[in-house]
């Protein structure tokens, strides 16, 4: 279904009483606005954040805004597999269910750097960190069905390709290409998950939130910074940017859709590279090898 220029605002009074939601990177931007909305719907909210000081501030704001005090924050550094494993161990121990996982956290067009495990930062945080987190929570999610896994990607995926021979951009680093690769990886991950989850009652969704005024653009320099400055008046605010995440998380009509890509609260087409099942499978296998996990 094509995206229309004149889009009608989506809204829903769907309640989430008794449901548990985990959102990564929810101490700022669209993640925080997503958490506020889902808390208002009655869900138990866990925000997973690297900066616990900011997380505590966000927690207070979410509780005050929503009137729901069933909200907690947990420390999670997606650039460190040790932190991810510790987080998942605690989550599996303390939480009896997980109905909605929103893989929201991310880094964007940042200078070349490596994660604690030696992965290029953008593929490491945006894809591999969430891949491992989802793997470690997979059984709990399946036991909690009906459940949803929502992955925040970007329209930038259309400029991306998966470099299976140099996924960490060690031979040549272009921060825009590396970002686009990581966002394409998000879409392929959702697609691969959907196939593995057929018949389980767990569905997956990847999405473009829109051009949103958030902290993600802090690393933009030169021409990118100039372009962002020019287009900023047309950007969505964080509340508007959260709408497609919320749509994928709660819209009842999506319960029979899985592995698809969304923008502006509408199912839409991703790039042809985002539909390449052969590359998706190779990326899955490579991700497992890099993370030293077995996940058929």
Image (cartoon, rainbow, N blue to C red):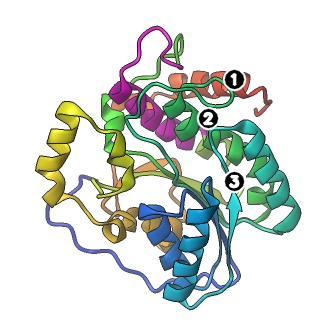
Magenta-colored segment: predominant secondary structure: helix
Of mark 1 and mark 2, the one earlier in the sequence is 2
**Which residue is nearer to you in this view: 68 or 80?**
80
**Which residue is tagged 1?**
290
Horizontal relation, residue 14 to residue 236: left or right: right
Residue at 62% of width from left, 53% of height from top? 50
Q: Is residue 270 visible?
A: no
Q: Residue at x 58, y 32 (%)?
A: 124
**Against 12, is 217 above or below?**
above
Quadrant housing residue 140: bottom right
Coordinates of residue 206 in the picture (x, y in percent): 47, 50
Cα distance between the residues tagged 1 and 2? 9 Å
**64 lies above or below 79:** below
Res 199 label: 3
Mark 2: few/some/many CA within 10 Å (<14, 14-19, 20+): many
The foreground one among 84 and 141 is: 84
Badge 3 local density, few (<14 within 10 Å), some, or many (20+)? few
- Toward the viewer: 57 or 211? 57
Q: Are marks 1 and 2 in contact (CB under 8 Å)?
A: yes
Q: Are marks 3 and 2 in contact (CB under 8 Å)?
A: no
Crowding at mark 1 (Cα within 10 Å: few <14, some 14-19, many 20+):
few
Q: Earlier in the sequence, mark 3 or mark 2?
A: 2
Instruction: Please report the bounds of the magenta region as a residue range.
Output: 168-192
Q: Which mark is residue 128?
A: 2
Q: Is residue 250 above or below residue 281?
A: below
């Amino acid at each position: 279904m094509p995206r229309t220029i004149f889009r009608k605002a989506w809204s829903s009074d769907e309640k989430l009483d008794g449901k548990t939601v985990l959102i990564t990177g929810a101490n700022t931007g669209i993640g925080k606005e997503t958490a506020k909305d889902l808390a208002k719907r009655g869900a138990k909210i866990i925000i997973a954040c690297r900066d616990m000081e900011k997380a505590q501030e966000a927690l207070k704001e979410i509780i005050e805004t929503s009137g729901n005090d069933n909200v907690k924050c947990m420390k999670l550094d997606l650039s460190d597999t040790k932190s991810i494993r510790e987080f998942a161990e605690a989550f599996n121990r303390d939480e009896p269910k997980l109905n909605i996982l929103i893989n929201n956290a991310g880094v964007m067009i940042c200078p070349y750097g490596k994660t604690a495990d030696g992965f290029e930062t953008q593929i490491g945080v945006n894809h591999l960190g969430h891949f491992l987190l989802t793997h470690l929570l997979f059984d709990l999610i399946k036991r909690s069905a009906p459940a949803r896994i929502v992955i925040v990607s970007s329209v930038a995926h259309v400029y991306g390709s998966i470099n299976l021979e140099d996924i960490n951009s060690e031979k040549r680093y272009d921060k825009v290409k590396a970002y686009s690769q990581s966002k394409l990886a998000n879409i392929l991950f959702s697609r691969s998950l959907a196939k593995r989850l057929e018949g389980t009652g767990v569905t997956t969704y990847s999405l473009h939130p829109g051009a949103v005024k958030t902290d993600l653009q802090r690393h933009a320099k030169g021409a990118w910074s100039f372009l962002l400055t020019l287009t900023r008046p047309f950007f969505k605010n964080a509340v508007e940017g959260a709408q497609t995440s919320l749509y994928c998380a709660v819209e009842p009509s999506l319960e029979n859709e899985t592995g698809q890509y969304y923008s502006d609260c509408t199912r839409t087409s991703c790039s042809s590279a985002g539909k390449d099942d052969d590359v998706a499978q190779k990326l899955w296998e490579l991700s497992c090898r890099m993370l030293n996990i077995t996940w058929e």
